[in-house]
Image (tube, rainbow, N blue to C red):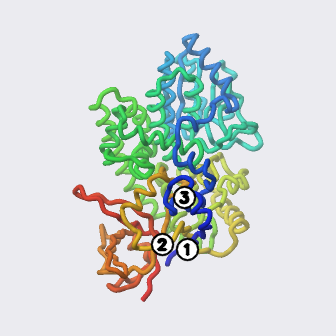
Amino acid sequence: MNKQWNIRKHDYDKVSELSSAIGVPPLVAALLISRGFGSESDARRFLQPSLDDLNEPFLLKGMERAVARIRAAIDAGQKILIWGDYDVDGTTGTVLLRKALASLGASTSFHIPNRFTEGYGLNQEYLAKAKADGIGLVITVDCGTRSFDPIAWAHGNGLDVIVTDHHLSDPERGIPAAAAVVNPNQAGCEYPDKQLAGVGVALKLAQALIGDGGHPEQMNEFLEIAAIGTVADVMKLTGENRSIVSLGLRQLTRTRNHGLRALMEISDCTAEMTSLHIGFRIAPRINAAGRMDVARHVVELLESSEPASARRFAGLLDSRNRERQRMQQEITEKALLEAVQFPGHQFVVVGGEGWHRGVIGLAASKIAEKLNKPAIVLSIENGVAHGSARTVGDFHLLNALENCSDIFVQFGGHAAAAGLQIETSRVDELRKRLDEFARTALGDSDPMPVLNIDAVVTSDTLGLDLLDRLSSLEPFGVGNSKPVFVTRGLTLLRDPLVMKEKHLKFDLVDANRKRFEAVWWDGVERSNGQTFAPGTGIELAYTADANTWQGVRRLQLVVEDLDIHT
């Protein structure tokens, strides 16, 4: 057992009542209650997301000003520049907003900044170029909330900027002096759902611009794009996001978008589409473009007008993703070796000269997961370190960085992820201060990671019908995680099969000789040297999945942790 198991307890009277009221199995009712949907109305709404669940877009502060300025630009024939961030959220939002504006007759171009030469957010140099090229209005997607100086320059030089974003604003400076700021997380915004992704805010702007006169098929095209950006940005899949992603997933399997179809084909997920397909197959290929400096190709892919060019762009993204995987593994290994030099630190800060800036965020995620501590990985060049930070548990990353704000060149982000720039001469000071902050928040001990288990499931109820019952709870993700179950009384039938030198595959049986297949991804490393002899008793914590091979669909248990009984 590598983790502390926290097995949830259920009120079986309430479970039975909800199960009868809405006609679902008791297991589904128990999961609904534990996730905060215990009333009949809340449960039905959760299980049946629809367009009616989308909030009124004009509840967003700044939306009326944004819509008025955009309509004025269209009426005057002004050229509009969409400035999107280089991640999946920003690039998908850029495509969505360009589609919406094109349907209204607007003339648009787009700019996805180079993450290495331009960095995150707006910059004065390209704004000046846009102004010289005749751009009359700039609309940001997934950025701009903290671009105070570039927006001030634009305002002073007669170039209006509308910010659409979801990142947290500066607690002292507020929001920039833009023509309008549409951000559910800005002060004074009473929008009921604060969890929208950047592409979600772009969707709300499209809704507001088009109104009720839009064709239903147009909204479907928006939703399939918004679903990808929302999942990829690891937003909570509750509330409005659940409806966006659920409806978008339904549309993706029958999409008419050549780029999406080509990307799904090269990612091997055309037969079905879930949030996990987006998170582990689609999103990494799109994100790799921004990480490897070809983010513009994402927009070109999703706007491809014919299949041949779409396949070409999809192939390019796929090759960049393979390159990204190689670099990520190399830098993660180096970062873990450096982390050993700081034993006992509660906040890991590591870095190296020339580490590829496109993969340091992924490396930070791996280190945070492996060490169960918040982590920053730095890429150092010419006396300046660019860093990506990732958190664990409920540790609020942005609060930690704001506590050290005086030593950064710049920084920004969320509670769970952030980016920063700092002079290398101050890295040691940063490491010391973040460690002190983390000790105050987390304590001095190294706690065992907690595995939250949703329910105990007996082996006789395990089967493909379990997956069918659970499918009504999809899409799974942050805020609605895939259920983790524990089953006791299993026995290892034979030695585990080692796959690709790092994964483990188990053949298990219960007391009645009913057989189960289980796979433990990275099990060679995660098992911490445990031995698994035939006949070993196993208590298994897992998620339930389906494995289809040569047309045969079988239940597969994906191991989260296990406890051995000799």
Q: Tell me how far mark 1 sits from mark 2, CA to CA.
A: 10 Å
Assign a secondary structure to mark 2: strand
Query: Looking at the image, which residue is at 57% across and 38% down?
Result: 198
Position of 430 relative to 94 (above/below)? below
Q: Amino acid at mark 3?
A: Ser
Please identify the residue farthest to the bottom as the structure is shown: 566
Q: Position of residue 374 (x, y in %)?
A: 60, 62
Q: Position of residue 489 (x, y in %)?
A: 42, 81
- The reply to whether dot 1 and dot 2 touch (C-beta < 8 Å) is yes
Residue 503: quarter of image: bottom left
Q: Nearer the viewer, mark 3 or mark 1?
A: 3
Q: Nearer the viewer, mark 1 or mark 2?
A: 2
Position of 133 relative to 59 (above/below)? above
Residue that badge 3 annotates:
19
Residue that badge 2 annotates:
486
Q: Residues within 10 Å of mark 1 (few under 14, many from 20)?
A: some
Q: Nearer the viewer, mark 2 or mark 3?
A: 3
Position of 490 relative to 11 (above/below)? below
